[in-house]
Image (cartoon, grey):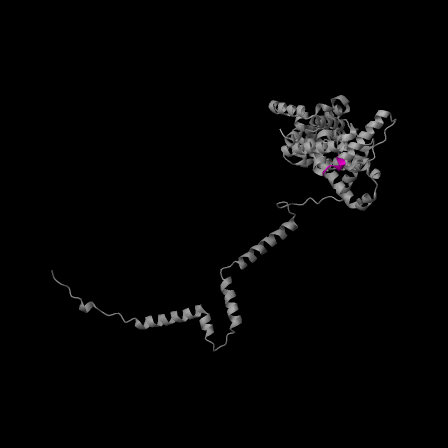
Amino acid sequence: MRQNSSNLLAMSLDKQDSSFVYTDEQLIARFQTGDEQAYVELVNRYRDRLMNFVFQFLGDMEQSEDVVQDTMLKLFEKKHYYREIAKFSTWIYTIARNLANTELRKRKRRKVTVLSQMTRDEREYELPAIQPETGQEVQNKYTAKRIQIAIHALPEHFKTVIILRDIQELSYDDISSIVGVPLGTVKSRINRARLQLQADLKDLR
Amino acid sequence: MNRYEFEDLISDYIENSLTLSKRKEFENYLTEDPEAQSLVDQVSYNIDQLKNIQKVKVSDHFNDYLMKRIKNEQSKHRLNPVPNQKRFLGFSPLYASLMTGFTIAFFIVGIQLFAPDKDTSISQNRFYANNPPTLSSPTIAKSNPKSQELAEAAEDSVDQKSIKSPKKDYTKQIQLVKD
């Protein structure tokens, strides 16, 4: 019976357009019963989203990918810790956020002297190469860089919520679950973070 | 509406989550203050920029590398399997027995510490420390209220025995009276 359902899932996963058939919660439930194809589907759904999320924190492609790998590995190893009282997305974002914070703390310990000796240009993030670069792409790249610097300059509690809301486009409820603060506090933080970003990016328009 | 109230409501205004009356109030403030309108436009523009920020993707070999890591982790677990032993309230037998031992020891020490005789013995020790007893010293008798009481009780019992007179025979003195 399980074999049949597994085969069915595998077949559905093979078809690109039918991947939405299962919700995240259904997939994790299947994975918890031993269906590894469901795990692959969850990885495919979340790897880029989490990469974007973590990259905004760390600003480094390789390190961000390592953190996303760790997140997925944790999902594999700790699958039974998930309970369907929360959405799967909030659970996986919470894992990624905690791992990214751990990485940031490690980095602070490792590079505190080196960073202080770096110039402003050196501190700025490196974006992945874009080929070929047209005028618009150069402008986009510049804007993205400025935004990243402004986000990075935000206090930690502002940074997380603004990334989750305006870049990841999550709902206020989901953000509240991920960061573990009341809804009103989340709204207030997002508003304050937007005002601070506005002050930093006045000349962007 | 003052400046602080206005700033607090910017996000709600942009996201259309203000009540109708609040929205009107907000828009009145905007018409009165052109700088406020510019601020709202700028915040709205930044939100759009953030939404359209260049998205990064994982590398092409992400899944392959992940599967390799998972296999490595699994083989590690196979090489160092976790012993499947019985657990008592989440403790291994060794820790369970240690915990039980500590609990019992703690209980016994607790009883010893809070036993009712504790005060008496401490005060007696202090007394003897200050007044070392000698054989001739009457302090032993004085300091030991129990022995004094026993002696008194013994004396009493002797007295009572001596006080007790033999039972008298009153049968001869009884006279039956006729009605």
Position of residue B24 measured from the top left corner of the image (x, y, whole percent): 62, 23
- Residue farthest along the top direction in this orientation: A17
Position of residue B129 measured from the top left corner of the image (x, y, whole percent): 53, 71
Q: Considering only vertical position in the picture, is A121 above or below A37?
A: below
Magenta stretch, residue numbers: A151-155
Please tell me which residue is depicted at 77% across the width and 24% down the height of the picture.
A14
Instruction: Reply yes or no: does residue A152 show up in magenta.
Output: yes
> Looking at the rendering, which quadrant does residue B60 occupy?
top right
Q: Considering only vertical position in the picture, is B148 above or below A120?
A: below
Position of residue B144 measured from the top left corner of the image (x, y, whole percent): 46, 70
- Residue farthest along the front direction in this orientation: B32
Q: In this view, does B61 lie to the left or right of B25?
A: right
> Looking at the rendering, which quadrant does residue A195 occupy?
top right
Q: Quadrant of the C terminus of chain B?
A: bottom left
Q: Considering only vertical position in the picture, is B113 above or below B157?
A: above
Can residue A34 be seen?
no
Q: Quadrant of the N terminus of chain B?
A: top right
